Image (cartoon, helix red, strand yellow):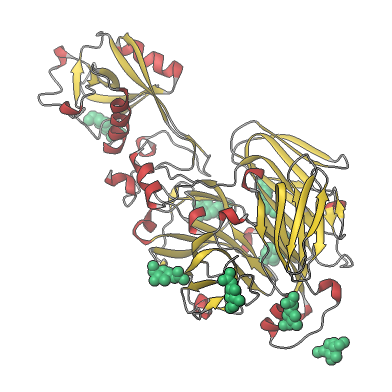
C-alpha cells in the first residue's frame, strides 16, 4: 500500500497505463506492394490473462474465430487472406476482437521477409484527437541515402488508416494546412488515405484508431519493408523519453511531433526550436553508443525513423511494472530493458532475476539500459519500480517496438493483475473457526511475513479505528511449541516477528496469536488461548499473471519475502 503510494508520487501524474482490454479493433494495411509474388500472412497473437477466457475474432464479412484460451499462453490466429487493405477508400475490412476477460493482442503482418508487428491497443486507449506526424517521405528517403530520387506518386507519401472504434456513424475531420476534410465513417469501418504531407491532425466525434503506414519504405539493395505505427492520442503525450538504442543504430533519425513550437534536449541533439508540425529529421549519433534520455519543452511524441522501420519510444508516463514479450522469430530476438539505475538489479525475467553485468547508465537520467537475448515468450517485470521494455528482431530488416504492457503497478511477487485485499471479520470466533472462515471467504487468516506486510495490515487497521484484538494466522506447534505461520492449508516457519514486550507468553497462556490494533501499542502481537473469541483479519492474495515457471509454494515465493531480490523499494518500507 505504502509502496504503491510512494511510487505513484514518484511518477507525478500517477496515471496508470497498460494494454489490457476486452475489446479491440484493428486493420491490416498492405504489406509490400500487392504485386509482390508471395502471399501475405496476417495474424494476431492473443494472450489471455485469466483461465477460460472466451475470445472471439471476427471480420465484417462473416469470418469468425472463437476459442477458450488458457491463461498466459500466446495463441496465434491467422486471418483470411483478403483482410489486407490496399484500397484508398472506406471499407469494412476491420478485425474486431472481444473477450470475456482481459487479453492482450499483438498483430503481425508478414510478406516474404517484410515483417511488422504492432501491439493492438484496446479501445480504452483510443482517442478522438491525434496529431499526424509530419513525415515527408521523399525528404526522409533522401536523408537516408543522401541522393535525390523520384518516386512514383503512389509510394511517395505515407498512408493514413483511420478505424472507427464504435458501432455508430463517426464524423472524422482531417485537419489540413489549407482546408479541412470531413469523412463519415460507418460503424467499425476503416478509411485509408494517401497523405499529401499537409495533414496536421485527425479529430472525431467518437473514438478512432489511427495508423501511419507505408507498404514499401526503401532499404538498401532495392528492398522494401512495410512500416506501421499506431498513433497515440495527444492526451497521452509526454515530455520525458528514453530513446532506445536499436540493433541497427547507424542511419537512425529522430522525428518529433508536437502541436507547438518546441525545443528538445538530450544526447547530442542540436539545440534550437523546432516548429510545430516540422518534418525535420533530427540527427542523434550518440544513439550508436547507447540509449539516450530526451526531454522536450512541451508534450510531444517521438519516432525513431530508419530505412525499414518507425518505432515510437515509450514516454516515461507510460512506463509499466510488467511486460509480456512475444517475439515472432525467437532465433534472433532481443529485449531492451530500461530501468532506474538504483533498482536495475531487481529486474526479473519470469521467475528469475535478470542477471546481467552489461547494464549501461543513460546520461543525464536516473536510468540504465541492457539488451537481453530472448529464446521465446517471457515476462519481464520489476517488483518495485516502473520500467520500459522493447522487443527488437533482426531478419532481413529490423522490426519490433514496445513490448506489451501487462500491469502498471509494481508488485513484489510478479505481475499483479488484481491487487491483494484485506477483509476484517467482525464476528468473534475462536482461532480455528477464524482460520476455517478465512479459507472460505478469502484465502487465509493474515500472517505478516515481513515489515512491509505488517505495515500493510496496520494501514487497514488504522482506517477501521478498531480497539480490540484480532486473530492473525500464527500459532504454536503442539509438538515442539515452535511458532509458525498458517497460510490457508500450508504452514511456514516464521522469519519476522512483532511481539509486544513479554510476548509471546508461556505456552499455557496461549498457543495462538493476535494483533492489538492500536498505534500506542505499536500494533504488537500477543499470544492468546486459541478458544478465545476474537474478530479476525482475512486476506485474499493478489492475482498474478502466470509467469513462465512453475509457481512454487515455498517460502521464497511468499508475499513480501522475495528472498532473491534485495534492491527493491519494498524492503525499505
Ligand atoms: C525526377 O523527375 C524530374 C521531372 O520528371 C526530372 O526532371 C528529374 O531529372 C528526375 N530526377 C531524377 C534523379 O531522376
Ligand atoms: C517534402 O520534401 C520534398 C523534398 O525535400 C519537398 O520538395 C516537398 O515540398 C515536401 N513536401 C511537403 C508537403 O512539405
Ligand atoms: C512558431 O515559429 C514560427 C517561426 O519560427 C512562427 O511563425 C509561429 O508563429 C510560431 N508558432 C507558435 C504557435 O508560436
Ligand atoms: C530537460 O531537462 C533539463 C534538466 O531538468 C533542463 O535543464 C532542460 O531545459 C530540459 N530541456 C527541455 C527542452 O525542456
Ligand atoms: C504467437 O504465439 C504462438 C503460440 O504460442 C507462438 O508459438 C508464436 O511464436 C507467436 N507468434 C508470433 C508471430 O508472434
Ligand atoms: C528466423 O530467423 C533465422 C535467423 O535469422 C532465419 O534463418 C529463419 O528463417 C527465421 N524464421 C522465420 C520463420 O522467419
Ligand atoms: C530460455 O532462457 C531461459 C533463461 O533465460 C532458460 O531458463 C530457458 O530454459 C530457455 N528456454 C529454452 C527453450 O531454451
Ligand atoms: C523450520 O523450523 C524447524 C525448527 O526450527 C526446522 O527444523 C526446519 O528445518 C525449518 N524449516 C525451514 C523450511 O526452514
Residue toward you, 320 or 163: 163
Residue at position x 73%, y 35% from top? 67
The single residue placed furthest to the left in the displayed view is 502
Question: Left of 45 or right of it: where is 303?
Answer: left
| Rendering quarter of residue 512 | top left
Vertical side of 328 occupied by 552: above or below? above
Regarding residue 252, the answer to whether it shows in the image is no
Vertical side of 11 occupied by 300: above or below? below
Q: Position of residue 186 (x, y in %)?
A: 83, 45
Residue toward you, 525 or 155: 155
Q: Position of residue 534 (x, y in %)?
A: 28, 12
Vertical side of 43 occupied by 5: above or below? above
Question: Left of 550 or right of it: where is 512?
Answer: left
Question: Left of 479 or right of it: where is 5?
Answer: right
Q: How many marks?
A: 0
Question: Left of 487 or right of it: where is 123?
Answer: right
Residue at position x 45%, y 44% from top? 409
Q: Position of residue 96 (x, y in %)?
A: 76, 43
Regarding residue 193, the answer to whether it shows in the image is yes
| Rendering quarter of residue 314 | bottom right
Image quadrant occupied by the C terminus? top left
Amino acid at each position: 500500500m505504502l509502496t504503491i503510494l510512494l511510487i505513484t508520487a514518484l511518477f507525478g501524474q500517477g496515471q496508470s497505463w497498460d494494454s489490457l482490454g476486452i475489446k479491440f479493433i484493428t486493420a491490416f494495411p498492405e504489406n509490400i506492394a500487392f504485386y509482390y509474388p508471395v502471399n501475405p500472412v496476417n495474424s494476431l497473437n492473443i494472450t489471455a490473462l485469466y483461465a477460460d477466457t472466451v475470445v472471439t475474432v471476427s471480420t465484417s464479412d462473416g469470418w469468425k474465430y472463437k476459442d477458450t484460451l488458457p491463461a498466459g499462453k500466446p495463441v496465434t490466429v491467422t486471418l483470411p487472406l483478403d483482410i489486407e487493405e490496399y484500397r484508398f477508400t472506406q471499407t469494412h475490412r476491420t478485425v474486431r476482437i472481444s473477450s470475456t476477460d482481459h487479453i492482450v493482442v499483438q498483430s503481425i503482418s508478414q510478406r516474404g521477409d517484410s515483417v511488422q508487428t504492432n501491439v493492438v491497443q484496446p479501445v480504452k486507449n483510443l482517442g478522438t484527437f491525434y496529431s499526424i506526424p509530419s513525415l515527408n517521405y521523399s525528404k526522409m528517403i533522401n536523408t537516408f541515402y543522401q541522393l535525390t530520387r523520384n518516386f512514383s506518386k503512389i509510394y511517395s507519401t505515407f498512408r493514413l488508416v483511420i478505424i472507427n472504434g464504435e458501432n455508430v456513424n463517426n464524423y472524422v475531420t482531417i485537419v489540413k494546412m489549407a482546408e479541412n476534410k470531413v469523412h463519415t465513417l460507418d460503424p467499425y469501418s476503416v478509411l485509408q488515405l494517401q497523405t499529401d504531407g499537409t495533414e496536421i491532425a485527425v479529430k472525431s466525434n467518437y473514438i478512432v484508431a489511427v495508423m501511419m503506414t507505408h507498404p514499401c519504405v526503401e532499404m538498401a539493395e532495392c528492398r522494401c519493408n512495410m512500416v506501421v505505427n499506431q498513433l497515440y492520442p495527444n492526451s497521452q503525450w509526454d515530455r520525458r523519453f528514453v530513446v532506445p538504442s536499436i540493433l541497427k543504430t547507424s542511419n537512425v533519425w529522430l522525428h518529433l511531433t508536437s502541436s507547438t513550437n518546441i525545443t528538445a534536449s538530450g544526447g547530442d541533439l542540436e539545440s534550437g526550436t523546432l516548429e510545430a508540425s516540422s518534418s525535420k529529421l533530427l540527427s542523434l549519433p550518440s544513439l550508436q553508443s547507447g540509449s539516450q534520455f530526451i526531454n522536450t519543452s512541451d508534450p510531444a511524441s517521438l519516432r525513431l525513423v530508419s530505412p525499414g522501420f518507425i518505432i515510437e519510444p515509450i514516454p516515461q508516463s507510460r512506463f509499466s511494472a510488467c511486460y509480456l514479450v512475444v517475439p515472432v522469430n525467437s532465433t534472433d530476438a532481443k529485449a531492451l530493458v530500461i530501468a532506474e539505475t538504483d533498482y536495475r538489479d531487481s529486474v526479473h525475467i519470469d521467475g528469475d532475476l535478470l542477471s546481467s553485468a552489461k547494464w549501461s547508465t543513460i546520461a543525464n537520467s536516473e536510468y540504465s539500459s541492457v539488451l537481453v537475448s530472448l529464446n521465446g515468450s517471457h515476462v519481464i517485470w520489476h517488483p518495485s519500480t516502473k520500467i520500459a521494455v522493447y522487443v527488437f528482431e533482426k531478419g532481413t530488416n529490423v522490426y519490433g517496438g514496445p513490448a506489451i504492457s501487462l500491469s502498471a503497478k509494481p508488485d513484489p511477487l510478479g505481475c499483479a493483475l488484481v491487487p491483494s485485499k484485506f477483509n476484517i471479520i467482525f464476528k468473534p470466533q475462536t482461532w480455528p473457526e477464524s482460520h476455517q472462515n478465512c479459507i472460505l471467504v478469502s484465502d487465509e487468516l493474515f500472517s505478516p511475513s515481513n515489515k512491509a506486510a505488517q505495515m500493510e495490515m496496520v494501514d487497514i487497521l488504522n482506517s477501521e479505528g478498531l480497539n480490540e484484538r484480532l486473530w492473525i494466522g500464527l500459532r504454536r506447534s503442539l509438538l515442539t511449541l515452535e511458532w509458525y505461520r498458517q497460510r490457508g492449508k500450508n504452514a511456514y516457519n516464521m522469519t519476522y516477528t512483532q511481539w509486544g514486550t513479554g510476548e509471546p507468553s508461556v505456552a499455557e497462556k496461549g498457543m495462538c496469536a493476535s494483533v492489538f490494533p492500536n498505534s500506542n501499542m505499536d500494533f504488537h502481537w500477543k499470544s492468546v488461548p486459541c478458544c478465545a473469541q476474537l474478530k479476525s483479519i482475512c486476506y485474499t492474495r493478489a492475482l498474478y499473471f502466470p509467469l513462465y515457471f512453475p509457481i512454487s509454494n515455498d517460502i521464497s515465493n511468499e508475499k513480501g519475502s522475495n528472498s532473491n531480490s534485495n534492491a527493491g523499494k519494498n524492503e525499505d518500507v
